[in-house]
Amino acid sequence: MIELAPSILSADFARLGEQAQAAIDGGATVLHVDIMDGHFVPNLTIGPPVVASLRKVVTVPLDCHLMIERPDDFIPAFAEAGVNWISVHQEACVHLDRTLRLIASHGCKPGVVINPATPVHTLDEVLPLVHHVLVMSVNPGFGGQSFIRASLEKIKLLAKIRESRRLSFRIEVDGGVHHDTIANIIRAGAEILVAGSAIFDNANPRESASRLLETARAAVKTRVQDLSSVAGGP
Ligand code: DX5
Ligand code: ZN
């Protein structure tokens, strides 16, 4: 199932509930919440109190993308604030297996994220533990950056590994998801599309969300059927 996960990073925070609802009215079924600490990435965003306020006004799953150092210290607070999915960066977790199990122990769906320079195979051991793999298609920290094309091969490789190992994680993509990149992202095998500026830099987030979904659904019909042509698989 194709799902659109608007990133509230590009929303007007003074009208957060209203903007999130507009994107949901346009067909979004997940909300992507970017948490930055000024250390792991060169930017700061929000903490658990803002997330708890958002939780009160929307019913869709909250997809919490932790771009922070020491995520174990904050996972309980975000779970308590009402998020449903929590993803952590492979690059930020020395004990990744432990961190993913910690997320699950707090009743949230665990996800793992890889930066553009991180190889897919660094995830081999944890793939059976995760609900989703988030492929960063920009270097994390800011909205509005250009899509890094090499991410498409990583998406294809993940889809191939999932098939060959009979796993069930979902493939999510974050960064530079726009009308002109979405078709290739979908064809490569992604299912959950994070989009910030493509939705909220528009005066009408409902309309932009709905158009993105329409483009994504049209692209499903042209998806790569034969994943065996992808190089580098197991
Ligand atoms: C970047 C964040 C993204 C960001 C995407 O570090 O993780 O979720 O909001 O923004 P766009 O869709 O504008 O590239
Ligand atoms: Zn994100």
Image (tube, rainbow, N blue to C red):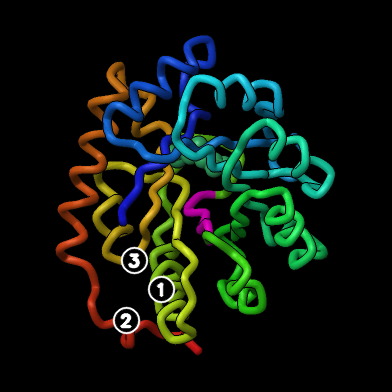
Tag 3, which secondary structure? loop
Residue 118 location (% of width, % of height): 61, 66
Q: Nearer the viewer, residue 107 or 153?
A: 107
Q: Is mark 3 within 8 Å of ligand 1?
A: no
Residue 12 location (% of width, % of height): 48, 16
- Name which residue lies at 61% across and 59% down: 112
Q: CA distance from mark 2 to mark 3?
A: 9 Å
- On residue 189, the disc is 3
Q: CA distance from mark 1 to mark 2?
A: 8 Å
User: Disc 3 vs disc 1: Cβ atoms closer than 8 Å?
Assistant: yes
Q: Does the magenta segment cover residue 196? A: no
**Residue 90 occupies quadrant:** bottom right
Is 179 above or below relative to 55?
Answer: below
Give the residue furthest to the top: 14
Within 10 Å of disc 3 (Cα), the crowding (few <14, some 14-19, many 20+) is: many
- Name which residue lies at 28% across and 35% down: 27
The magenta region covers 133-138
- Name which residue lies at 29% across and 50% down: 182
Q: Is residue 230 left or right of residue 72?
A: left
Residue 123 location (% of width, % of height): 62, 72
The amino acid sitting under disc 1 is Ala
Label 2 sits on residue: 227
